[in-house]
Structures are given as structure tokens and as C-alpha cells.
Image (tube, rainbow, N blue to C red):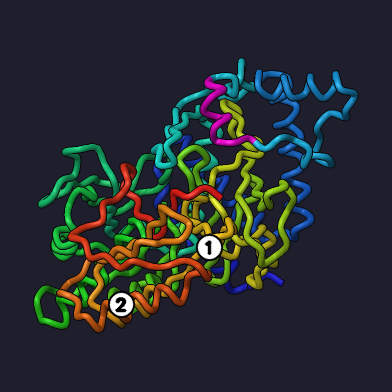
Amino acid sequence: MADRSERRRLDERLAALDARALPDAQARRLLALQRNLNESQWWPTAQLSSFSARLLTALLEFAFAHVPHYRDIDRARRAAGQAPIRVDNFGEMPVLTRRTLQRTERRLDAEQLPQGHREIDVRRSSGSTGMPVETHVTDVGNLWQGALNLRAHLWAARDVRKKLAVIRKLERGVASYPNGDAQPAWGSRLLFPVRTGPLFRLSTEASIAEQLEWLSRVRPDYLLTFPSIVRALALLAMKQSNSNDGARLSLAGISTFGETVDDDVRALAQDVFGARIYDTYSAEETGVIALECPSGSAYHVPSEALLVEILDENDRPVAPGEIGRVVVTMLHNYATPLIRYAIGDYAQACEPCACGRGLPTLKRIVGRERNMLIGPTGDAYWPSFDTRRLREVAPIAQMQFRQDARDRVDALFVLDAPATDEQTVALTRHVHALLPSGMRAEVRYVDAIPRSASGKFETCWSSVAP
């Protein structure tokens, strides 16, 4: 049953945004769509499924008629005497891999767009997987992304009149330390149809110490950044607090993106900054995929805008509690339709959320395939190294686990102070205890662990094939 008090709070927050609406047609469209989303999130699952099915039917009909890649699939099925792909046999549609998206070049672009849709944007992935891709986006697709972005702020009870700080990967020379840069609003009118407070940005080229010093000067209400940066900032702030070196930073809220969020970083954010983390699961080529529920128990897939399947290695849906690969279908962007697109991530399926929303749920986002370790027998598993326990053993500022052979994991640690022999033995013992039989851990101390080209950081990384 829907939480009536939560529904009332969301309606009140949206009414407050309405009062600050910008005077243009885009703002009116976005706020009108948001009013609809405020209602549809509470629809029963069956009603949401019926709504998504109508959108999927329209998308499939368009793609088979106007997109070369999908037209080829449809023609091949018909030539083989197979039934056309429809909603009831949607699982027979081939999964679109990232490599296919990259190799087919523009054969996934529509030859024409439906009436009322126009292409306005190009999205390019960071290429962190080694396979950068490009997709084209329509104004309708962007409108929906703006609405989902606004839904995230409503769920997190953000006061858009306050100050927002963003620390992320930016072009070289942009928003550099010591000053970063400042903008009059949180974002473009495509994302924010209302008057907001100022935005302050800093590039991840700045060191963690520089980032924390910059934040102490900017004094934002909200912070948007990678989970790994939240962790590093919190650990440094704790160290400075213990030594009475540096001002205490308090935040009203933290938004994260781009990496997996574990319980350790959530606890650190609450303990050090007094702020809860609200995570958004997204990808460059798709935009928002799932939003963290205000209850904190799960992630919700906005099924008014996309479908998400969690599939096993045979492309069959996994059961609640099981982990599978994430396959996404975008329902509103017709410029480069992404239908059953495997984005390269893995997530854990779960039962419906107790919050009362009819939206589908994911328990947690686990990571990319390269974040799995491969055991000596070739079995893959998702590691959990209990980073909080490791920090209790030694003064660890940063850590990463890298696998280049089936029988060995290199545990890399950046320390705030030299480790004793006893600490090294304890670290090695702890990591060993979490590895499968036949694998050994080698503890190594390093000065720094670099981020990827996209600015992200992965705690576990394996180059070993299953």
C-alpha cells in the first residue's frame, strides 16, 4: 500500500517547485510531466506494466520500419518463418551488446523520426570499457531525462534554492583548483525548469586534500560526486578532525553516481558529514536507469521511461536475490533506439519494495564484468573485502584489488602512515580469508592508485578471462 504521507510530501515539494518555475514552454512541459510521474510511481505494478507495454509496442513498430539494424532482425525472422517480435515474445529479441552498438556505427540510427520528435543531442560514453560508443538523442528523450533527474531531487528532498557543489571529471583546465568555477544555476533548463541556487564545480584533477580544502571554502549544502571521492574526503576529514587540523564540513545531502556504493561509504558519509547518500544509477548512453528509493531499501527503475531486465548467462531472467547482467530498453528516444541493450553492468534482482511504489526494483548495483574475480577453477564471483575492517587493521587511505592471474590477487594500499610488520600480516590474512581456495594475496604499498580516464575508481579489477 502506498505511503500517503510520502505522497503528500512529494506533492508539496513539487508545488514548491511550481512556484519557482521559469517562464518558458520547456519549464511548463517538464513540470507537467513531473506531475504525471508523481502519480504514476504509485500505480499498481500491473498498471505500470500495461503502460510500458504500450510504449514498447510503439517503439518496436517504429524500429522495425525505420532503423536498419532492427529491420534486418525483423526481416530475418519473417524469412525463417518466425513470428514477429512483439511484447508477448519480447524475450526473443537478440540482446544488443556494446560491441554491436559500436561496430554497427550508424545502422542503429533512425532514418526518420516520428512527428513531434527532433534530434538535438549526441551522447558519447567515456569508453572506460575500452569500447566508447555514441548515441543520438531527441528532444523527447531529453525531456524524460530531465523529469527523471527532477524526480531524484524530489525523492531526496533537495532544496534547489541552496548551494550545490560538483566534483567530477572535466576537460583539462576547466574548474581547476584552487578556485574551480561557479555557475548561477544547478544546470540547464533541460534539467531544471525552476530557479535554483548557485553551482560550484571542481575537477577531479585536484587532489583529495585540495578538494576538501575547496569544499571548506565553498561551504555547499549539497555535494554531487563519485562514491570513491566521498570515501576519500571522509577519511581525510576524519584524520584532520582527530588532529584538530581543518574545519569540520557539514552537508545537507550527498548525491553519487558512476560507481557502486557500499555500506562503508554510506556510514562514513553519515558519520563525518552528517549526510545521507542518495545514489543514481545511470550510464552515458542511456541516462538514468534507476534511482535509490527514499526508504533506502532498493533502487527503483522508472518504468514509465525504460525497461530493465536482469538476465543470466543464457539471457533468462534471474530470480529475486540473484545477480545478473543489466539489459536496458529505452522507451522514448527514437533517434538511436536502444532495445535490450546490455550495458556491461551486473545488478541484484529483488522483490517489490515495501514503500508502496509499483516501480520495478533492484537490490543493488554490483559492478561491471571486469569487477568480478575469477577463481582457479574458472568460476567467477563478486568479492567483498570488508573495507571497513581493513581500515581498522591499518591506516589505509585508498585500496584496490587487482587480479592478473587466476591464483593471485594484488592488494594495493595507499597508507597515511607506514605499516608495521604485524599490520601487513593482518592485512594479508584478512584478504586471504575472503579469497577462494587456491588463490593467494600479495599486499603491496603504493604512493597512489590512479583513476580511469573517466574519473571513476574501481575497488576491484580483474583482467583474467573466465
Q: Mark 1 and 2 residues: CB-CB less than 8 Å, in contact? A: no
Q: Position of residue 118 (x, y in %)?
A: 54, 23
Gap in angstroms between the C-alphas marked 1 and 2: 20 Å
Describe the element under mark 2 as helix, strand or loop.
helix
Towards the viewer: 117 or 223: 223
Quadrant where the N terminus sits is bottom right
Q: Is residue 51 left or right of residue 453?
A: right
Q: Position of residue 45 (x, y in %)?
A: 75, 58
Residue at 29% x, 74% y: name it: 273
Amino acid found under the numbered disc labelled 1: Trp
Q: Which mark is residue 391?
A: 2
Towards the viewer: 124 or 94: 94
Describe the element under mark 1 as helix, strand or loop.
loop
19, above or below 124, in the image: below
Residues shaded magenta: 96-105
Residue at 57% x, 71% y: name it: 297
The image quarter containing residue 278 is bottom left
Q: Is residue 443 left or right of residue 261?
A: left
The image quarter containing residue 224 is bottom left
Amino acid found under the numbered disc labelled 2: Arg
Q: Residues within 10 Å of mark 2 (few under 14, many from 20)?
A: some
| Residue named by callout 1 | 382
296, above or below 107, in the image: below
